[in-house]
Each structure stands twice: as C-alpha cells, then as structure tokens.
Amino acid sequence: MTDMPPGDKAPLSDSALDQLFRTARTYNRFTDKPVPKALLQAVYDLMKWGSTSANCQPARILFLTSNEAKERLKPHLDEGNVKKTMAAPVTALIGHDLAFYEHLPEQYPAADAKSWFVGDNQKIAETAFRNGTLQGAYFMLAARALGLDCGPMSGFNTEGATKEFFAGTKTQANFLCNLGYGSEDGTYPRGPRLTFDQACQIL
C-alpha cells in the first residue's frame, strides 16, 4: 500500500478491521468493569458523523445504566434477554424520532427539506426507521472503535418500551444494544456468513 497515489486514503490496519468486523462478536455477558459516562458521550460524538439522508439524524438513544432504569425495561424484555440485559453495565435503547424533520432547517440548510415530509406520514415513518436503524449500526461501530463490546438484540416489546421511555414524544423504540467489556463466557460459536457470490452481483 506504500505506492498509493497522493490523496488516496489508505485502508485501516488489519487489527482495526478485526476489532470492527472480523473478530467482533455479539456478547451475551460482560465483565464488571464500569463504562464511564464520558465514554458513552464519546460513542455518540463519533457515531453522529455517519451519513443520513438529508442529514436527518432521527436516532435517539437512552443509556440505561441504573438499576431503576433497567427495572423499567425488564417487563418489556423477552424472557431469554432478561438476565443478560439486567447484568450488562449499560443497555442502549435506540429509537427514532418521527419529528426529525422539525430540525431540518438547521441540519440541512441547503434546501427546504422540512417541506418534503410535512403531512406525509408514510415518508416520515420510512425515513425515520431507515435512517435511525442506519445510525444504530454506526453506533455499534463507534462503540467497537472506542474499545467497547456490543450485544445488540431485538427481543423486546417495542410498543411497551416506547410507552415506558418515550411517552409524550414522537420517538419510537427500535432495538437494544448492551454495552460493556465482553466476557467470552457465554458466547456462541461464530456463525458462517454468506459468500460474495451468494449475496452479491456486479451488474
């Protein structure tokens, strides 16, 4: 890679790619090492630079760190997710704000983007869900990049969690991501991935 033309970006190191993708795992258990508030803020401050359509940024994140907050979530968890979530140092509840377009005059001043959405509930819902989910993926990569491990999951009652944590807003719960420093105890054997030829075509 030393012969790359000036201005071309060099790929990340193998160790960085391993940390982000190749050896990264979904963790079911974490060590007791605490996750400082400053690190949670750093995760957001990194993930926020990921691209969204019209810079709409609909993701809203609640970091559940206290026992009280976890107890509020507990009734909405699928049975298989209760123990690991209650034991995780942090559980991020990732949602998307259906009122995201109200911020577009400041976030996307290049055009009157707010007018694209006002009154079009289907477009609002599709855009918020798609881009909020995309930001959730950025969130996981940012967490891994900063040394945290992730345990993402969708096994919970999103309607119940929305009412519990986002009442009075237009934010809807999407998925959960436990955070901390992962313990290999409790991880499953790594599952196979589809090959390029199974998943992709070049047209």
Image (spheres, helix red, strand yellow):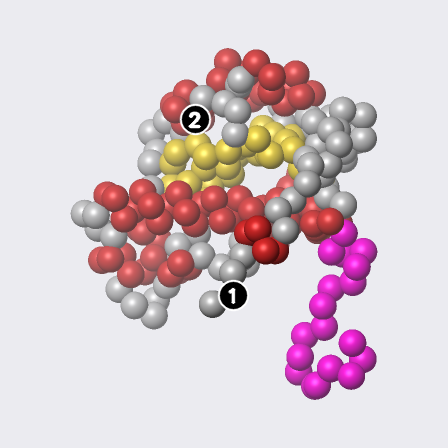
Can residue 164 be seen in the rendering of this structure? no
The x and y percentages for residue 142 are 64, 50
Q: Are marks 2 and 1 in contact (CB under 8 Å)?
A: no
Q: Find residue 9 and report its horizontal and vertical position in percent.
A: 68, 74
Q: Residue furthest front?
A: 197
Identify whether 169 is placed above or below 102.
above
User: In front here: 45 or 201?
Assistant: 201
**Residue 73 — which label?**
none
Real-space Cα separation, disc 2 to disc 1, in angstroms: 37 Å
Residue pointed to by mark 1: 202
Name the amino acid, label 2: Thr
Which residue appears at 76% of the width and 45% of the height? 23
Q: Say what secondary structure mark 2 lies in.
A: helix
Q: Residue at x 26, y 64 (%)?
A: 112
Disc 2 residue crowd, few under 14, some 14–19, many 20+, Cα 10 Å: some
* Residue depicted at 50% across the width and 13% down the height: 75
Q: At 57% from the left edge and 14% from the top edge, which residue is drawn?
A: 79
Q: Is residue 27 magenta?
A: no
**Foreground of the two, 154 or 160:** 154
Identify the magenta region: 1-18
For the view shown, which residue lies furthest in the bottom direction? 6
Q: Can you tell which of label 2 and label 1 is closer to the viewer?
A: 1
How many numbered circles are shown? 2
- Residue 16 in the figure: left or right of residue 133: right
Q: Is residue 120 left or right of residue 165?
A: left
In the visual, does 92 lie left or right of 9?
left
Location of residue 178 in the rendering, given as x and y in whole percent from the top left corner: 63, 31
Mark 2 — residue?
158
Q: Under tag 1, what secondary structure? A: loop
The amino acid sitting under disc 1 is Ile
Magenta part, dominant SS: loop
Q: Where's residue 25, x and y in %? A: 71, 39
